[in-house]
């Protein structure tokens, strides 16, 4: 497998998560196993949904999705114009309708983190052999 990179942007709107899932499926589907694809799709959906819910609305903000696949791993970055936050991946209770995003990233990704620059970035990597 050769290295593949893809970028996409989405409006801060409810349909952003489904649009991001479609990009992940189209771009990663041919390159990775079903399990890696399903995990990456779920995590992107959670992170994009978080961006839609929490990113500031000033100006013309966009969510950016960056995908990179090489023979060893899938790397995904979801960024938004937010100022960042402190990561608290905790197990949400069954009655909570939110709080699952970073918990799932922590459980399913092989590596992940948060970078705050001029945008808030949450990244994760999944080993292709996972």
Image (cartoon, rainbow, N blue to C red):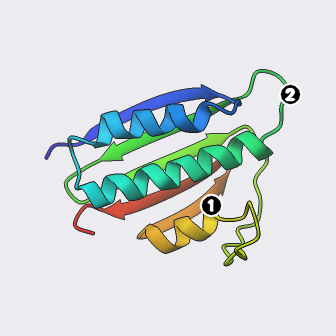
Q: Compared with residue 38, is residue 78 higher up or lower down, i.e. above or below?
A: above
- Circle 2 is placed at which residue position? 58
Residue 70 visible in the picture: yes
Residue 42, image x, y percentages: 48, 54
Residue 117 visible in the picture: no
**As drawn, is 8 to the left or to the right of 3?**
right
Q: Compared with residue 114, is residue 63 higher up or lower down, i.e. above or below?
A: above
Give the quadrant of residue 130. bottom left
Q: Compared with residue 18, is residue 124 higher up or lower down, i.e. above or below?
A: below
Name the residue at 61% across, 70% down. 103
**As drawn, is 39 to the left or to the right of 33?**
right
Query: Crowding near pointer 2: few (<14 within 10 Å), some, many (20+)?
Result: few
- Circle 1 is placed at which residue position? 101
Residue 77, image x, y percentages: 51, 47
Name the residue at 19% across, 54% down. 71
Identify the disc placed on residue 38.
Answer: none
Query: Crowding near pointer 1: few (<14 within 10 Å), some, many (20+)?
Result: many
Residue 123, image x, y percentages: 52, 55
Instruction: Give the structural element (helix, strand or loop) at label 2.
Output: loop
**As drawn, is 85 to the left or to the right of 6?**
right
Name the residue at 73% across, 60% down. 98
Name the residue at 73% across, 27% down. 61
As drawn, which residue projects farthest toward the right?
58
As drawn, which residue projects farthest toward the front?
95
Q: Earlier in the sequence, mark 1 or mark 2?
A: 2
Number of the front mark, 1 or 2: 1
């Amino acid at each position: 497998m050769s290295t593949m990179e893809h970028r996409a942007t989405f409006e801060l709107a409810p349909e952003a998560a489904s649009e991001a899932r479609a990009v992940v499926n189209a771009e990663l589907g041919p390159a990775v196993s079903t399990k890696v694809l399903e995990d990456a799709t779920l995590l992107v959906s959670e992170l994009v949904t978080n961006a839609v819910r929490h990113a500031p609305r000033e100006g013309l903000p966009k969510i950016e999705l960056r995908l990179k696949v090489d023979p060893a791993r899938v790397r995904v970055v979801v960024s938004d114009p937010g100022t960042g936050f402190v990561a608290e991946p905790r197990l949400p209770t069954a009655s909570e309708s939110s709080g699952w995003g970073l918990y799932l990233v922590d459980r399913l990704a092989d590596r992940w983190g948060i970078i705050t620059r001029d945008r808030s970035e949450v990244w994760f990597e999944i080993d292709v052999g996972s």
